[in-house]
């Protein structure tokens, strides 16, 4: 190992904004590479605190606590999108933040995200800005009466989404306020897929092969690698993901979720500039995981050529299928990852199982 690499990781601490399972898995990989972690989260029961060297338990807007994060961290990353930009701008004055704030700006707002991707010449679902119920009805006339109404911000795992079919608007438990909503046309798709891209500080790009995702009620239930599709579609999906990562100047990793429609066209759904649920298969199926790749980029460590040792089906563990853990613990090719959350709930992600073949 080169001396410069040793210097980059010796006595270093990675600050992580967010203490969920993604933060926990980033911390696990950092620790394996000899890097300490300082984890910041408002929830005192955050699972990532189990793997933290330093814990900051406070709201993201407390400048005293943000200064403490700066003091205790050499580099900073985030595990989810919904961190106030004002807080990140405050941190950015003193520490580099990975994978960057430009990608976060777009991923925090579905309207900005759709506009950005569309402006790159990449296909997205038809979309319209919504300020009131009149806008909804206008959009539905253009979308043949069926669409998905979504909050522009703070939505995940199906939250903040309302399916509209045959012009029947559901009972929305909130007021339609200006600049709060977007409506998207429904895509008739054959498959949902995702690509995880790695981009280094000098702009070198690498990506994992595409994988297929299966959702239920807006929550990812399974990811299957390898994707069963033509090489042409796989290469096109990778090219799209690489183009987005480059255009956003990502330094670290980014996930790009897409649809393959009935005409074998690829339509981008969402981006996530962080480790992603659909990339958990990389932990056990490859020579490098999405989490290790992020840590390596941040601390200037080389990214090896990705090798694939196994096919893999990643199964999310939620409250409603929590019982699968007991059986899987006894099966040799089932690698169980339990997040250590404080409470079991039906729609809550509590762990995952990588089934290797």
Image (cartoon, rainbow, N blue to C red):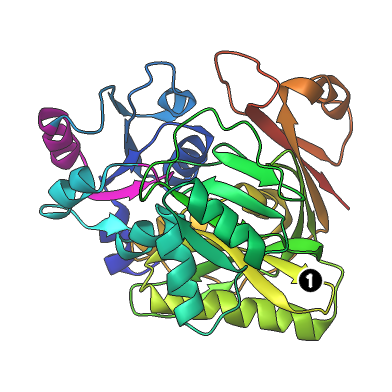
Residue linked to disc 1: 261
- Whether residue 288 can be seen here: no
Q: Is residue 34 above or below residue 348?
A: below
Q: Is residue 243 above or below residue 346?
A: below
Relative image position of residue 121 (x, y in whole percent) = 52, 85
Instruction: Give the side of residue 354 with respect to residue 161, left or right.
Output: right
Quadrant of the rendering where the N terminus is positioned: bottom left
| Residues drawn in magenta | 63-82
Asked which quadrant contains residue 285, the reply is: bottom right
Relative image position of residue 6 (x, y in whole percent) = 31, 59
Instruction: Give the side of residue 236 with respect to residue 79, left or right.
Output: right
Instruction: Look at the numbered disc 1 and give the secondary structure of its residue.
Output: strand
Residue at (59, 27) in percent of width and height: 339
Residue at (45, 64) in percent of width and height: 113
- Whether residue 168 can be seen here: yes
Instruction: Give the side of residue 222 with respect to residue 96, left or right.
Output: right
Asked which quadrant contains residue 279, the reply is: bottom right
Asked if the stretch drawn in magenta spans residue 78, the answer is yes
Front residue of 23/148: it is 148
Relative image position of residue 356 (x, y in whole percent) = 83, 49
Q: Residue furthest top?
A: 343
Residue at (53, 27) in percent of width and height: 173
Few, some or many residues within 10 Å of mark 1 (<14, 14–19, 20+): some
Asked if the stretch drawn in magenta spans residue 314, the answer is no
Instruction: Give the side of residue 183 with respect to residue 185, left or right.
Output: left
């Amino acid at each position: 190992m080169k001396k410069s690499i040793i210097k980059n990781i010796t006595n270093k601490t990675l600050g992580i904004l967010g203490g969920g399972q993604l933060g926990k898995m980033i911390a696990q990989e950092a620790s394996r590479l000899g890097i300490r972690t300082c984890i910041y989260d408002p929830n005192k029961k955050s699972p990532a605190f189990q793997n933290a060297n330093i814990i900051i338990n406070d709201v993201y807007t407390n400048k005293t606590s943000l200064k403490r994060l700066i003091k205790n961290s050499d580099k900073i990353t985030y595990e989810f999108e919904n961190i106030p930009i004002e807080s990140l701008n405050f941190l950015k004055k003193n520490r580099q933040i990975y994978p960057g704030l430009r990608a976060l700006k777009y991923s925090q707002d579905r309207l900005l995200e759709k506009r950005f991707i569309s402006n790159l010449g990449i296909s997205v679902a038809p979309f319209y800005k919504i300020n009131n119920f009149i806008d909804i009805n206008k959009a539905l006339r253009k979308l043949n009466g069926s669409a998905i109404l979504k909050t522009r911000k703070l939505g995940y795992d199906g939250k903040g989404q309302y399916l509209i079919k045959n012009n029947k608007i559901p009972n929305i438990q909130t007021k339609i306020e200006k600049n709060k909503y977007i409506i998207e046309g429904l895509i008739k798709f054959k498959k949902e897929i995702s690509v995880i891209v790695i981009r280094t500080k000098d702009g070198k790009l690498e990506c994992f092969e595409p994988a297929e995702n299966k959702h239920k009620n807006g929550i990812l239930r399974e990811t299957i690698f390898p994707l069963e599709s033509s090489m042409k579609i796989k290469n096109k999906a990778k090219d799209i993901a690489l183009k987005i990562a480059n255009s956003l100047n990502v330094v670290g990793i980014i996930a790009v979720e897409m649809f393959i429609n009935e005409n074998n066209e690829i339509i981008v759904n969402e981006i996530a500039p962080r480790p992603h649920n659909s990339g958990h298969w990389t932990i056990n199926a490859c020579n490098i995981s999405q989490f290790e790749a992020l840590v390596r980029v941040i601390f200037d460590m080389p990214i090896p050529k990705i090798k694939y040792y196994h096919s893999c089906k990643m199964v999310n563990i939620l409250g409603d299928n929590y019982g699968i853990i007991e059986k899987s613990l006894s099966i040799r090719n089932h690698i169980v990852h339990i997040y250590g959350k404080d409470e079991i709930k039906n729609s809550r992600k509590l762990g995952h199982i990588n089934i290797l073949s």
